[in-house]
Image: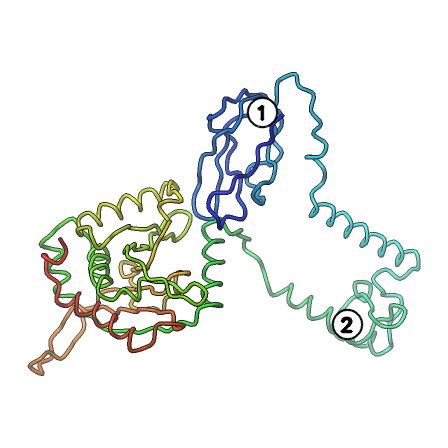
Amino acid sequence: MNEVKMPRLGVTMQAGTVANWLLEEGDFVEKGDYLFEMETEKATVEIEAMNSGVLRKIIIPEGQEVPVNTVIAILAEEDEEINLSPYLEAQPAEEATVQVAAAVEAVAEKQEAAGKVGGGGKAAPKARQLAKQLGIDLATVIGTGKDGLITEKDVQNAAAVTETTAELRIKETIPLNHVKKSMSENMLNSWRNIPQFTQIVSVNMTQVLKAKKELGGVSINDVIVKAVANVVREYSIVNSRLEENKIVVFEDVNISVAVNSGQGLVVPVVKNADSKSVSEISKEIKALSEKANNNQLTLDDYANGTITVSNLGSLGIETGTPIINAPQSTIIFAGSIQKTPVVNEFDEIVVAPMMKLSIAYDHRFIDGVTAAGFTNAVKNALENLSVHSLA
């Protein structure tokens, strides 16, 4: 008999979900065959069988999340005698539910036996008067006073619950999928543990639009990613993270790029973006976006990002204050391009395509002056862009 356990993919992985069993109970499995699809907070991965045998029992059903190393199935010989009872015992959560239900039932029985279901048979005079005014049925109120006496406060609480329940109508309850759960945990961790500040500048995008037109086949986002990568080479302090009491500055410029998918917003990585042309970056982002839409991004697609670029300009968002993609130290947020009246170097009012650029920094080791150097460098790189700089 062989136990199939939820594997650990990466040192930070704590749990996984059986997204889909690829075989059924009773099927023979060869070592190396794909046994099930595992969904983590970052990707869906097909998992191979580590042993051969018959899939005798599926313990964890599809859609259930369990910690790593949890036994999820049993492989054995077809005629091998196996004891499945240790694996099929009630889960702790189920046992707790049963215990709570039993306790509630016992209380109800005790109250009913005393003729005081809900405590309604025993209430303070003022509580009865208040209940009549508010239209509260005392039979539904649990007394917290001595010997279960219903007090005015109990009636007030019951009225508040009734009022709230009446006002709030739930349309639907949507569980967080793994992408959104990962985003929730990462953003909460970032906001709690990284003191961050944001610098915002207006960028004249005339040269960017000109370069985009000359090159053809690339997007504004592709150009921004390449321009940022070029500047990061000169301001490597933003290409870093804080580990304990040490600043770790990376040689590789790996840009995490925010991409929309059916699962939510994800941030796969364009590795070594500074050494790639804008055309190469464009092709890579398109490929990553397609994989994201098909839920085919792998753990490697997410790995080793050093700085993030998020662009919601195409969605009409003018500006924003982004939250750092922990454990990175810097995130660049690009807004939409707006035709805006500006004053040129000749003090003339002209219309120019302007974009708000917001950059958030880890304030634990990046100060405002250092950040301003990078912020202005990105602004200048975009405003003085040439096709040559994108090669």
Determine crowd level at label 1: few under 14, some 14-19, many 20+ residues with C-alpha closer than 10 A: many
Q: Residue at x 50, y 32 (%)?
A: 36
Q: Is residue 146 left or right of residue 281?
A: right
Q: Is residue 323 left or right of residue 17?
A: left
Q: Residue furthest toward the front?
A: 246
Q: Is residue 123 left or right of residue 326?
A: right
**Residue type for callout 1:** Leu
Q: Is residue 358 left or right of residue 211?
A: right
Find residue 360 and report its image quarter. bottom left
What SS does tag 2 mark? helix
Closest to the camera, between mark 2 and mark 1, is: 1
Q: Residue furthest toward the top?
A: 79
Q: Position of residue 170 (x, y in %)?
A: 57, 57
- Identify residue for label 1: 55
- How far apart marks 2 and 1 lie (CA) works out to 58 Å
**Residue type for callout 2:** Val
Of label 2 and label 1, which has the lower sequence position?
1
Compared to 192, does 55 lie above or below? above
Which colour assignment does the render follow? Answer: rainbow
Q: Which mark is residue 155?
A: 2
Q: Residue at x 37, y 73 (%)?
A: 197
Viewer-nearest residue: 190 or 177: 190
What SS does tag 1 mark? strand
Find residue 333 and report its image quarter. bottom left
Q: Position of residue 368 (x, y in %)?
A: 32, 77
Q: Position of residue 22 (x, y in %)?
A: 49, 29
Determine crowd level at label 2: few under 14, some 14-19, many 20+ residues with C-alpha closer than 10 A: many
Q: Which mark is residue 327?
A: none
Q: Position of residue 256 (x, y in %)?
A: 33, 55
Compared to 127, does 69 lie above or below? above
Compared to 304, does 128 lie above or below? below
Viewer-nearest residue: 385 or 159: 385
